[in-house]
Image (tube, helix red, strand yellow):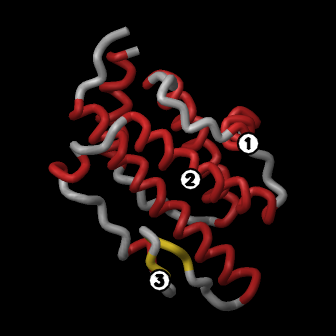
């Protein structure tokens, strides 16, 4: 197995944070449609009000460089949990692999970068399906996603 360099982890962690913006936007849109009000959501342990997706900031590269593969996996599981709730509310079937991974919730140090990459692709597909259902344009930075995708494909 090739070494996973810090730059690759940094890019993927940053990309997951952009996915978090997409999910917060979905939550806000869903709340607007169902309740006519916006919920308070937790961002980094802090309760925030409406319009939170724009307030989410991706940390600096130096801060991201301290992240590990376990941190990446933990954030991925958090996002999957958020998406599962949204999918249940909208009666949308998501990728069963993500749900099984979330339910097992084994924040394992043994998970490979390749496995995380595959889960990320499933997560991205689920986010896109929900965005299409709700008519939302995503926050994800396409250039950064394409770059990370290219690097990970080279790795795999």
Say which label, 1 or 2, has the lower sequence index: 2
* Residue found at the very far bottom of the displayed protein: 37
Label disc, if present, on residue 48 of the rendered structure: 3
Which is more foreground, mark 3 or mark 1? 1
Quadrant in which the N terminus is drawn:
top left
Query: Circle 1 is placed at which residue position?
Result: 103
**Residue 154 placement: quadrant:** top left
Q: Position of residue 80 (x, y in %)?
A: 62, 49
CA separation in Å, label 2 and label 3: 18 Å
Query: Circle 2 is placed at which residue position?
Result: 78
Residue drawn at 57 percent across, 65 percent down: 136
- Vertical placement of 128 versus 33: above or below? above
Task: Say left or right for 16 vs 133.
Answer: left
* Residue found at the very far right of the displayed protein: 91
Q: Position of residue 129 (x, y in %)?
A: 66, 50
Label 3: how many residues lie within 10 Å, few (<14), some (14-19) or many (20+)? some
């Amino acid at each position: 197995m090739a070494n996973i360099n810090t730059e690759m982890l940094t890019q993927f962690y940053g990309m997951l944070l952009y996915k978090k913006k997409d999910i917060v936007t979905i939550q806000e849109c869903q709340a607007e449609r169902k309740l006519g009000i916006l919920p308070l959501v937790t961002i980094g342990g802090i309760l925030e009000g409406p319009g939170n997706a724009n307030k989410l900031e991706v940390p600096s590269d130096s801060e991201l460089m301290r992240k590990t593969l376990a941190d990446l996996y933990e954030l991925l599981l958090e996002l999957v949990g958020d998406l599962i709730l949204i999918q249940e509310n909208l009666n949308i079937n998501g990728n069963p692999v993500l749900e099984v991974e979330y339910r097992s919730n084994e924040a394992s140090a043994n998970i490979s970068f390749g496995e995380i990459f595959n889960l990320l692709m499933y997560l991205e597909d689920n986010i896109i399906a929900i965005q299409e259902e709700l008519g939302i344009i995503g926050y994800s930075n396409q250039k950064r996603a394409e770059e990370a995708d290219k690097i990970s494909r080279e790795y795999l």
